[in-house]
Structures are given as structure tokens and as C-alpha cells.
Amino acid sequence: MTTVDHFVNGASFAGESTRTAPVYNPAAGTVSREVRLATTADVDAAVRAGREAFAEWAGASWAKRQGVLFTFRELLNARKGELAAILTNEHGKVTSDALGEVARGLEVVEFATSMPHLAKGEYSENVSTGVDVYSTRQPLGVVGIISPFNFPAMVPLWFFPIAIAAGNTVVLKPSEKDPSAAIWLAELFQEAGLPDGVFNVVHGDKEAVDALLHHDDIASISFVGSTPIAKYIYETASAAGKRVQALGGAKNHMLVLPDADLDLVADSAVNAGFGSAGERCMAISVVVAVEPVADELIEKIAQRMGTLTVGDGTRSCDMGPLITRQHRDTVAGYIDIAIEDGATVVVDGRGIDVDGDADGFWLGPTLIDNVSTDSRVYTDEIFGPVLSVVRVSSYDEGLALINASKYGNGTAIFTNDGGAARRFQRDAQVGMIGINVPIPVPVGYFSFGGWKDSLFGDTKAYGPDGVHFFTRQKAITSRWLDPSHGGVNLGFPQN
């Protein structure tokens, strides 16, 4: 059986660990390969490679680093189909969704190619007689990235292109459930001309995570995952003196006002609730319907759900499997909880016909009405294709419901009332707001992140926040009493 090794100092690296974990093809329910689980010593080897490569990479010119980024961008765009196939095989998402994931990651690569401009400092001349003050932004050193299973390409791409463009070196620990995308990206970056040791990948479980959190030579930690783990990573790494951006879980609401276009709402609810089998931190999991629209809206949503096909992502279908059998069973268990709590299961995704192997980790789109706000179906982040409907009597009641949630990742309002939309974008206590947009993930030149228990640390991902996170500012106060002359050179300076 194929073993997915680490990638350290520009080459495949087995390390000293004898422990492995299975990697499944979720559509078949079978083990397709195994992945090595790093020891603390293996993590140290990756960090050491990054430390040894840092001085030369940080000292490289902006032009050289930018050239490597541009080449990486071109290679990634040309070969995105290869990466999408890996995502489908190990995560299960359908090909179109996998290609969309790569496209959103490419946005951040393109943003990172502008690093020479993004990292520019400021300059004030003659603040005192003969004295100038200016600032620069410099890289941190070796940075750690810990990414989740649901976006094995896009989430790493949120972080490492910016980190590397700024002059840092990277140790990435991807999810052990779908590790191959990270290796593919590291090898492609190497092909683009990245020096050995600048981008390293180690696979593993809690031992590898803790080794990164406590390592003296890791300057920062970037993480995306569930809230309990995000909180643990933030507290542990911060206590160790590191910069941390830890993005946690979500329970995203869609507030539907009576004047909304219900056909648009129904399309959006299905797209945002069941894309990628609901395994998105920005998925809509709760439709908050302001009466009297709930009955009509539920009928429209259910009609659209009846047209969806579930199956192997390599075939023509709308939705694939969940990542593991255990996760599938956990998500399906919420349907039983809903029934016990008195909710109405409008569409039950259990036992559906699928276009794929019967042993795959299948659960079809599920719609539950009359969900109580004290039910675990409402309070828990389910992270699967389960869409709940909560009925409210007014805009104010719906807004209060959203603001009472412990999560504050994303939310949306559907309305044709500009005043209501403007009020909502101001008053919703949530980090990312959609107005007639169900999944308000910012484009690459803004920043991604929520409020409350959806984000630990002050810095969001990518965009301007990403640049600031992966650099630190230095202010210089300068006085030169005599001019200097550098000699004559009529050519254009290069590199």
C-alpha cells in the first residue's frame, strides 16, 4: 500500500515514526493509502530545515521571490485538474466543487504576488532637522500552519503563499484524513523554483500539533478547525510566546424577510447548505424564516432537494460523501435527535439511492423544520448536509437569535429592503455578512474570519490581515550628515 511521506528540505522524508493512519476514498469506503504520523523528532527535522533556509530566503530580493510566486501561480492554474482529482479521491467532493476550491486558493496566490507593494513601509522626511523616520516590514522566521480536512488545498493556500512571499519559511501540518494535496502543492512549489527547506510538510496527529505549538523556533501558528481545538491551539501557542491566528467553528444563519425573492432564497439555501456535503465552516445550517414565508419556502427548498444527485465525485452528481464513516454516523445521529426534540424531518437523507459504491460514507441532503433553539440540532456545529429551519415572527427576533449564538463566523440576510439590509450589516454581531449572498467568503484581497467563538486572536486570514500577521514592522529614525555617492552605472539594476 502506498504510504504518504512527509516533505522536508525539498524531498520526500520518511522520518523515524513507525505509526501510520489510514487514508480513505470516502466514495468507496475503502483505504486507498496510508499516511505517516510524525514524531516530535520528525517535526523538529522539518523546523530545522526551515530555520536553515530562512536567512537566504528572507534575504532574497523582492523580484526573486515574486518570480517564484508567479511561476507557482502559472503551474497551479495549468495543472489544477490534477489537484482537483486528488481532492475528489481523498475528500469526496465533486469535481466542480474541487475545482472551485482550487480557484479560491489561486486568488490568494495572486494576491501574494503583490507582496512588494503590500509590504511597503512609510517615510517621513525631516521630522526634526536632518532626521528622517521610516518603517519596514520584515518576515518572522519559521511559521507553522495547521489545516483542516474539509479544504485540503484552499485553506493551506490561504496562508503559505503570503508567508513565503513575505520571506518566511513554512512547516505545514495538513489533516491526516486527506494529506496528499499538501504534498502535491509542496512539490509544485519546488518545481516553480522555491529553494529547499522553504516549504515543508509533516503529517501527524496531536503529537505533531503539540510539537509545533511548543517548538522554540516556530514564530507563529495559523489554524483553521473546530472551536474547541482552535481555543486549545490559541491558548497553548500564545502561552509559548507565538503569534496565533486560530479560526474556529460556526453556526451560520440565513435570515429571510417576507419581502425576499423566495426562489432566490431556496436556490441559495440548497447551494449553501449542501455544497461539499455541508462540510464547510461557511455553510448555511440554519434558515431563520420570518413568518409568514416558512411554509412556502420549505416547499421550494424541498422541491430543489429532490433534484439533487448524490454519488461518487468523479461522476456527474451534485454532492459527494462525507469524509469518514464515523463522521457520517455522527451527522446522521442529529436526525434522530431532531425527532426526539419534536422537530419535523421534511427530507431525510438517510438510506438514499446513490450513484456510487454502497460502502461509501453517504448521507443525503436533510431538511428539518420547527427546530427548537435549545435542541443540539440548533446549538451544535453539525458539519454535514443538515439544514434546519427556525421560524420567527419579526426581523428583530431573527437578529436577536443570530446575535445570541456563541459563534460569529458568517451570516446572510435575504431581502429587497435596502434599509433592513443596511441595518443588518451594522447590527449583526458576525464577522462576515452576506446581503442576498449565502456564503459571504471575502475575495483574496480582503480578509477572512469571524467574531466570538469563531476566531481566537486578533488577526484574520489572508488579505491585509495576512500580510500583517506574517510580517513585523520595524521603525527607523535616521540622520546622515554627509551625502554619499554610489558611482556611475547606466544600466538597469536587476535582482
Image: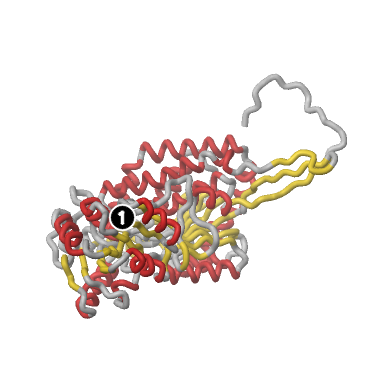
User: Which residue does the numbered mark 1 point to in the structure image?
Assistant: 414
Which percent across, then down, holds residue 222? 51, 59
Which percent across, then down, holds residue 166? 58, 46
The quarter of the picture where residue 373 lies is bottom left
Above or below, 110 against 39 in this view is above
Task: Looking at the picture, tell me which residue is in the foreground, 196 or 431.
Answer: 431
The residue drawn where x is 17% and y is 70% is 345
Above or below, 248 against 263 in this view is below
User: Circle 1 sits in a helix, a strand or a loop, which is it?
Assistant: strand
Which percent across, then down, holds residue 31? 27, 61
The residue drawn where x is 42% and y is 36% is 74
Q: Quadrant of the C terminus?
A: top right
Q: Quadrant of the N terminus?
A: bottom left
The residue drawn where x is 32% and y is 44% is 82
Residue 309 visible to an observer of this rendering: no
- Left or right: where does residue 454 sit relative to residue 492? left
Which percent across, then down, holds residue 361? 23, 64
The quarter of the picture where residue 310 lies is bottom left
Task: Looking at the picture, tell me which residue is in the foreground, 430 or 40.
Answer: 430
Task: Looking at the picture, tell me which residue is in the foreground, 51 or 314.
Answer: 314
- Residue flagged by tag 1: what amino acid is it? Phe
The residue drawn where x is 23% and y is 79% is 341
Extreme residue in the right direction = 481
